[in-house]
């Protein structure tokens, strides 16, 4: 293994997290057996899953908010025959990294 190579357990953790965060259809399930085989604890796997889900959910919320802001502009510019959309509440910008619902840091 070269100096730049990652240990296979780290690769499996990163892959699991990426699959979950990206909503990949395979969900990273094949990495679970590898991780268990490498001796990674269930607590470490659960932490990885929690962080990945948090990042996925946070990204979805941010995309939804961005869409809602842009959609509101499009609705205001629509013909008067269309009833206006209810106002969309501004969501304050969050810090660069917010903890997961379980209090785990993702940074």
Image (spheres, helix red, strand yellow):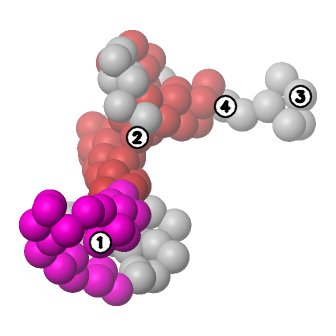
In the rendering, which numbered label is found on residue 76? 1
Q: Nearer the viewer, mark 1 or mark 2?
A: 1
Residue, disc 3: 2
Q: Which mark is residue 11?
A: none
Q: Which mark is residue 7?
A: 4
Q: Helix, strand or loop at disc 2?
A: helix
Number of marks drawn: 4
* Displayed quadrant of residue 44: top left
Q: Secondary structure at mark 1?
A: helix
**Residue sitting nearer the eye, 93 or 89:** 89
Q: Return the disc, 2 or 4, that comes first in the chain's sequence.
A: 4
Q: Residues within 10 Å of mark 1 (few under 14, many from 20)?
A: few
Q: How crowded is the residue under tag 3: few (<14 C-alpha within 10 Å), some, or many (20+)?
A: few
- Image quadrant of residue 61? bottom left
- Mark 2 and mark 4 in contact? Answer it, CB < 8 Å: no
The residue that mark 2 highlights is 21
Q: Which residues are magenta?
A: 66-92
Say which of marks 1 and 4 sits in front: 1
In the figure, is residue 95 to the left or right of 83? right
Judge whether residue 19 can be spotted in this image.
Answer: yes
Marks 2 and 4, Cα distance to the nearest angstrom?
A: 21 Å
């Amino acid at each position: 293994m070269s100096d730049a190579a990652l240990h296979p357990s780290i690769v499996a953790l990163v892959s699991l997290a990426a699959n979950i965060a990206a909503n990949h259809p395979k969900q990273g399930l094949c990495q679970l057996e590898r991780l268990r085989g490498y001796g990674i604890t269930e607590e470490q796997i659960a932490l990885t899953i929690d962080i990945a889900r948090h990042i996925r959910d946070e990204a979805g919320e941010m995309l939804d908010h961005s869409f809602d802001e842009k959609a509101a502009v499009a609705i205001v510019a629509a013909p008067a025959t269309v009833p206006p959309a209810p106002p969309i509440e501004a969501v304050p910008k969050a810090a660069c990294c917010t903890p997961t619902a379980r209090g785990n840091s993702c940074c």
